[in-house]
Amino acid sequence: MAYKQKPIESLSEAEWQAWIVDLARWLGWRCFHPRPAQLGRKWATHYTGEPGYPDLTLVHPRRGFIMVECKTQRGRLTPGQKLWHLELDAAGIEVYVWRPSDYVEVEKRLKEVRS
């Protein structure tokens, strides 16, 4: 049986995020993403601060500093995520919501050199 590749638009959020991280690392970006841990029967991501912080923090010496919320095609931002995005944008931080259908724009931005 031949391997059939999954259409990019049908990727789960975890698969989509892994795609972005793989590409970013290949292009020399430093990546940060807090990962949840299982404590007994419960999963949790421990942090201090307000909920909704973006999934990825990416930095590159020539390409800039960006923050990314990864969503599926139909995924929606929570109120906390919306507030983080508004405030990061107001502070001059480049912040995105990237969905699988944005893959061409994602690749373009990750390759773009900024001065």
Image (cartoon, rainbow, N blue to C red):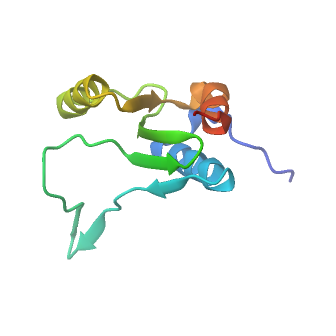
Furthest-left residue in view?
Answer: 49
**Image-based side of 24 in relation to 68, left or right:** right
Furthest-right residue in view?
Answer: 2
Residue 51 lies, in percent from the top left, at 17, 43
Q: Quadrant of residue 108?
A: top right
| Residue at image coords 21%, 71% | 41
**Image-based side of 86 in relation to 11, left or right:** left
Q: Quadrant of residue 100?
A: top right
Residue 46 lies, in percent from the top left, at 19, 62
**Image-based side of 23 in relation to 92, left or right:** right
| Residue at image coords 31%, 62% | 36
Residue 34 lies, in percent from the top left, at 34, 59
Furthest-bottom residue in view?
Answer: 40
Q: Quadrant of the C terminus?
A: top right
Mark count? 0
| Residue at image coords 41%, 30% | 94
Residue 32 lies, in percent from the top left, at 42, 57
Q: Foreground residue, 43 or 70?
A: 70
**Image-based side of 93 in relation to 52, left or right:** right
